Amino acid sequence: MTWIDWYNSLAKPAWTPAPQTIGTIWQIIYPIILVSFGAVLLQWMRGKIPGMVALPFAINLVANLLFTTIQFRMRNLPLAALDILIVWGTIIWCVVAIWPHLKWVALAQIPYFVWVSIATWLQLWITTHNWGK
């Protein structure tokens, strides 16, 4: 079964965005992540921010990139739910950590946080309604 056939077979709430909509939103969010996370990396490499400020960005990026593999290749809904909770929580950590140093980076995380909040709620719903599938 292809990943899309598997995904379509899952119980989902009525408000679930279409896969194309989800893809479009990520195409908007990923450039924001690239620019803002790149700025954090650059400032860390220049010694202008401590490693503990850059750490949540690194954790977030790894967790974000792992989600697709966990959800659609491994098809492990509980692990995907845990992963997206890590993504969601580290966005908050990112904002708190970077605020004193680069306020624009903190503010740039707002659309990312809003979208991941929706995606987290969706993932938790799907996980609880498809446990073991």
Image (tube, rainbow, N blue to C red):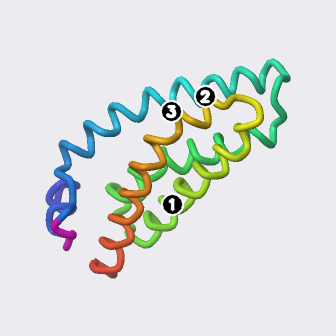
Disc 2 to disc 1, how far (Cα)?
26 Å
Circle 1 sits on which residue? 83
Q: Label 2 near label 3: C-beta < 8 Å?
A: no
Element on which disc 3 rests:
helix
Callout 3, which amino acid?
Answer: Ile
Residue 50 screen position, x and y as percent: 84, 34
Q: Residue at x 18, y 42 (%)?
A: 20
Q: Which mark is residue 33?
A: 3
Disc 3 to disc 2, how far (Cα)?
12 Å
Disc 3 to disc 1, how far (Cα)?
18 Å
The answer to which of marks 3 and 2 sits earlier in the sequence is 3
Say above or below: 30 vs 78.
Answer: above
Residue 119 screen position, x and y as percent: 37, 57
Task: Classify mark 1: residues with Cα within 10 Å, few (<14), some (14-19) or many (20+).
Answer: many
> Of circles 3 and 1, which is in front?
3
Residue 103 screen position, x and y as percent: 66, 31
Element on which disc 2 rests:
helix
Callout 2, which amino acid?
Answer: Trp
Quarter-wise, where is residue 41 in the image?
A: top right
Q: Residue at x 26, y 40 (%)?
A: 23
Circle 2 sits on which residue? 104
Callout 1, which amino acid?
Answer: Asp
Q: Residue at x 81, y 29 (%)?
A: 49
Residue stretch in magenta? 10-14
